[in-house]
Each structure stands twice: as structure tokens, then as C-alpha cells.
Amino acid sequence: MLVQRRIKAGIEALELLYEFLSILLTSFVLNLIPFFSPSNLLVASNAALLTKADPFAIGFVVAFGSASAKFIHYMISFFVGGHLREKQKERFDATAPKVKRWAFLALFVAAATPIPDEPVVIPLGLLKYSPLKFYLAFFTGKLSITMVGAFLGRAGQEFLAPLMNEEILMAISIILTILVTILLLKIDVEKIAHKVLKRKAKPS
């Protein structure tokens, strides 16, 4: 009898491990696709519906998989930033201090909401934002939404599906990423800010 219990417990442990690995792999692969911007709330809620795993653990695993995938996107753009032309590097260096002030909050919001991630992730990689701060902000943002999704999954998620249209999110993601990157590369933000401040300083 004791042996049977141990075998049963071992099988249940293996099943649980398989479930967590499946959830992690699914979250990682979906978020690894550029500009796809999957709804991690739905990933977590579906995982909670289809498995017996603890919702807290599901939320953590989905957030970890998502943040790890986007960290790869970030690191690619981080190293690409080192191969920009000298003039482009100068513009990025001038822009970086201003952008980095709000970077942590912007990453958290992008991770915690259905808005596309790449328009925030890629420019910050090009600006060489701190990898540690990036991962921390993105992971905590994803965790805040995947926990909600995991617990909603226990109650059912039929009403959530119509709210998320992956095709629209993908299109928005591509357009915004291109626009933000072009603006950073082509527009001298420092010069524009200087002109604006100079105008304000003139006596009326």
C-alpha cells in the first residue's frame, strides 16, 4: 500500500512538472515571436483552466517565460545599438538620459497592459538601458497581469476572448516600433528641446 502511494505521488509530481514545463515553453515561444504581443493574461488563464497547478505558480511561470523571451529581443537590439553610425550614436547618447528617467515605468506599463511591447523594448535596447532594470521592470509588470489571468482562469475566461485581437495588436506593434525607432534615429531631440526652451526664455 505504501509503495503504491509513493508511486502515485511520484506520477503526480512528474505530471505537475510536465505541466509547468509546458506552460513555461508556451509562454516563452509565444513571446519570442517578434511583434506578436500575445495576451499573457489569456496564456495564464488558459493554463489555469487546463491544469491543476497552483494559480500563483502559473502566474510566476508565465511571467518568467514572457520576460525571458522579451529579454532576448532587448539584448539583440542592445548589441545592434553598438553598430550604429557615429552620428546616430551621438543622438542616442543625447536622448538616453531623458528617456531612461521614465524607462522603468514605461516598461512596467507595457508589460502589464495589452499595449505592444516592442515599441518600448527595442528603443531601450538601442539606448543601452540597464539589462537588470529592464528584466526587473518587465517581469514585475508581467507578473501583475499573469497573476490576475491565472485566478480568472479558475473562474472561466469566455468573456475575455473578444477583448483581445492578436492581429490588431501585431499591426500596432510593428507600426509603433518603426515610428519610435525612426524618431530616435532621425530626430535630434536635444536640439528640439533646446529650441523650445530658448523660445520660452524670450521675453514676451
Image: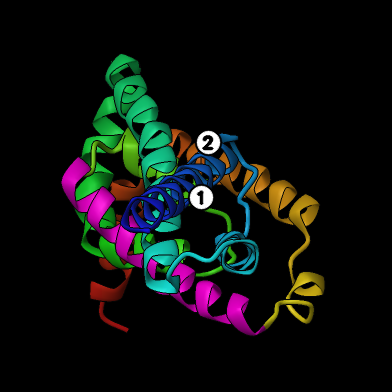
* SS at badge 2: helix
Residue 106 appears left or right of 51: left
- The furthest residue to the front: 1
Q: Position of residue 91 (x, y in %)?
A: 30, 35
Please provide the residue range marked out in magenta: 130-155
In this figure, which residue is indicated by the disc labeled 1? Answer: 19
Q: Residues within 10 Å of mark 2 (few under 14, many from 20)?
A: many
* On-image quarter of the C terminus: bottom left
Residue found 63% across the figure and 53% down from its top? 38
In the image, residue 23 sits, relative to residue 152, either above or below, namely above
Q: Nearer the viewer, residue 8 or 35?
A: 8
* SS at badge 1: helix
In the image, residue 193 sits, relative to residue 118, either above or below, namely below
Residue 171: within the magenta?
no
Q: Position of residue 76 (x, y in %)?
A: 38, 25
Q: What's the residue type where badge 2 is placed?
A: Leu
In this figure, which residue is indicated by the disc labeled 2? Answer: 32
Q: Quadrant of residue 71?
A: top left
Q: Tell me how far mark 1 sits from mark 2, CA to CA.
A: 20 Å
Q: Nearer the viewer, mark 1 or mark 2?
A: 1
* On-image quarter of the N terminus: bottom left
Residue found 38% across the figure and 32% down from its top? 72
Mark 1 vs 2, N-terminal side:
1
Q: Residues within 10 Å of mark 1 (few under 14, many from 20)?
A: some
Q: Nearer the viewer, residue 197 or 179?
A: 179
Residue found 29% across the figure and 55% down from its top? 99
